[in-house]
Amino acid sequence: NGLTEGLKANTTIKLAAPESKLALYKSWEVTPVSVVNNNQASHLTMVKPDTLLNTNIPSVFKTGKKNVYNVGVILPFMLDKNKDFMESQDQKARLTLYEPTRQALDFQLGVEMALDSLKKAGVNTNLRIFDVQKDSASYKKIFQTSEFKNLDLLIGPFDWIELTAKAAKENKIPMLIPVACSNKVMLDNPFVFKSITTASVIADESSRFLISNFKNENIILVDGRGKNDAGVQKAYKKHLNKYFFEQTGKKDSIRTLQLDFLSTNTIESILRKDKMNVLIVPSNDFSYVSSTLSNLHKFLSKHYHKDYKVTVFGTDEWIKWDQMDILHKLKCNVHVPAPTLVDFDTLHVHKFIKGFRNRYKTDPDKYAMMGFDLAFFWMAGYAQHGLDFSNMVQNYDITMNQTRFIFTKMNETSGCLNKNVYILKYENYKLIPQKND
């Protein structure tokens, strides 16, 4: 009755959450995450309308709801090496953990926090922690245990991913991979779910963003001829031309320049004053990128070049380069893609960090956030749909603490890949997310 003119396309309709889900939502307000904001329903009710689940498709997964779900986390705690490492430190550094141990521990704490949060909403889990070494034998030993074979969900590991994926498939266990790895692991294995997207998907999504926002500008793909960058350069050229053709009807129109060094004279010859100059530099060679931005900065800083407008598009590797002059990034209007992003300006991230601090007396890192995000997302799905959720995951578009989950299948028999890519812009000494729908 609130739609006075009837139901129309492209209208946003807000629906109240059913009473049966209120307990689940309230638990998210208690400890780390709240996704109930005023009249806005939980992210877990956000179904993508163009991919509504066809319930007639037979599921390869186990089905039905359970009173208690068996969740496994397989991690390399490396406790022996951690002991030796800590004992080798001086007295002041004795509390410093061996880095692989710290990463595994933080990830586990994130998972435990998520499961404890959901327990308040009546979602009961039996958590199994599998400690593995860096050798395949320790993994194979675990795969033979009844604890592993009876899992309803497996989170991890960081290593020996293909070996673990094979065991997950044999036992029909959904496996959530928290680290970047090859797409090969998903082939003919519908039980695999990759939470971190690949370089090829980043190139695809970045190209779509670039063409959508700058198709009428002066776009130049800069090829630095670096051997390690050849694959990424090729991917960008392919995707840029694809999206440019889709939106303009023009084929092979993206200009490519092969430059070992971007000199001042070269800069002036390729830039235009009447358009935004978009330089795409998909290189992970620090010295090449640094010299390119430095020369651009010098060029743009001249008062007689004030009419030139430049946007430089790089790779997610650039975010790690703290030694690169931030003024160069700001002056060159640098944009970078990234598979993950922690937005500290959001309420749910604030609540997560506060909850983690109160519980563990330390700050969460990216491993803790990913552990929490994966466990919370999947088990909240189990709470609503039972084990059938693994067959429905493609219907959801959900933003958690560190990433947005947009799972898609490579083909009918493959696993799922999270295709989320954030586009970030250096502005006011911060990385600002850009709209990329």
Image (spheres, grey):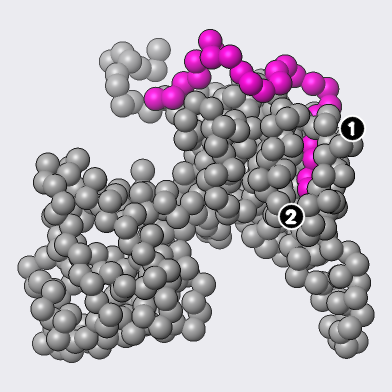
**For the view shown, which residue lies furthest in the left direction?**
274
Given this view, does label 1 or label 2 mark the residue nearer the observer?
A: 1
Question: Which segment is the magenta one?
Answer: 50-75
Please provide percent x and percent y for residue 190: 59, 30
Looking at the picture, does residue 172 appear above or below residue 297?
above
Marks 1/2: CA–CA distance: 24 Å
| Residue corresponding to mark 2 | 107
First along the sequence among labels 1 and 2 = 2
Inspect the image, locate mark 1, and give the three-letter code of the amino acid beneath it.
Answer: Ser
Q: Is residue 227 magenta?
A: no
Looking at the picture, does residue 172 appear above or below residue 97?
above
| Residue corresponding to mark 1 | 146
Secondary structure of the residue carrying tag 1 is: helix
Chief SS of the magenta region:
loop
Q: Is residue 105 visible?
A: no
The crowd level at tag 1 (other Cα within 10 Å; few <14, some 14-19, many 20+) is few
Observer-nearest of 341 and 133: 133
Q: Is residue 363 visible?
A: yes
Inspect the image, locate mark 2, and give the three-letter code of the amino acid beneath it.
Answer: Phe
Please tell me in which quadrant of the rendered image residue 293 appears: bottom left
For the N terminus, give its image quadrant: top left
Residue found 11% across the figure and 46% down from its top = 250
